[in-house]
Image: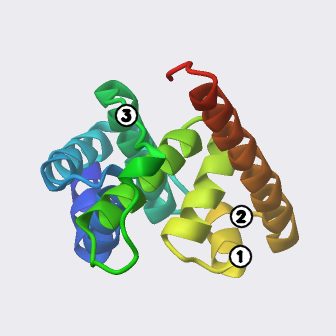
Amino acid sequence: MKNRQDIVLELLDRHGKSLHRLLARLTRCEHATSDLMQELFVRLSQSNGTRQARDVYAYAWRTAMNLAFEWRRQRKIRLSPLDQTDLPDESRPSVLRQMIRDEQIEYLLEATSKLDEPARSVVVMRFIEQESYERIAERLGKNPAYLRSLCSKSLSRLRGLLSERDSARGSGVTS
């Protein structure tokens, strides 16, 4: 039977790039990605779950996702919304357009962190990792039809969270 260190080293050899990509997409910060990859390695090396997991990659993926959202919660940087007068002129290429897009992604990731565990996993796999429902079903051991339903409900929940944020912003309340 392999020890945890060997399992983790083999996992990182086979799936290290995809775990790194996941952390990079969720944190949007290169130094955090590197730090979290190290933290992921340490946690997986010390966890009994690594050896007991039915699918070690799925276990590592879930651990990486939770690390990234934990990092986002601890960071607590609040974005200040842009005014309508700050919107870019359509005729010029705009760094501001990229800033607006980045701000929207940050709000979406913040809202995603508020979903419960299965919903958050499905949303991340489907829309950030661009996985098919069939592949998600394989990784989670669930029925694809159930995952489509969960994803649909999760998107409705995300719309509600973003709508609440927009309503609070419009009424002068900052989150």
Q: CA distance from mark 3 to mark 1?
A: 36 Å
For mark 2, give the secondary structure: loop
Tell me if 45 is positioned left or right of 78 in this view.
Answer: left
Tell me if 45 is positioned left or right of 102 in this view.
Answer: left
Quarter occupied by the N terminus: bottom left
What residue do we see at 73% from left, 55% from top?
A: 155
Q: Which mark is residue 52?
A: none
- Residue type at mark 3 is Ser
Q: How many marks?
A: 3
Neighbour class for label 2 at 10 Å: few (<14), some, many (≥20)?
Answer: few
Q: CA distance from mark 3 to mark 2?
A: 41 Å
Task: Evaluate whether residue 104 shows in this view.
Answer: yes
- Residue type at mark 1 is Tyr
Neighbour class for label 1 at 10 Å: few (<14), some, many (≥20)?
Answer: many
Residue 66 % position (x, y): 44, 42
Residue picked out by circle 3: 80
Q: Which mark is residue 141?
A: 2
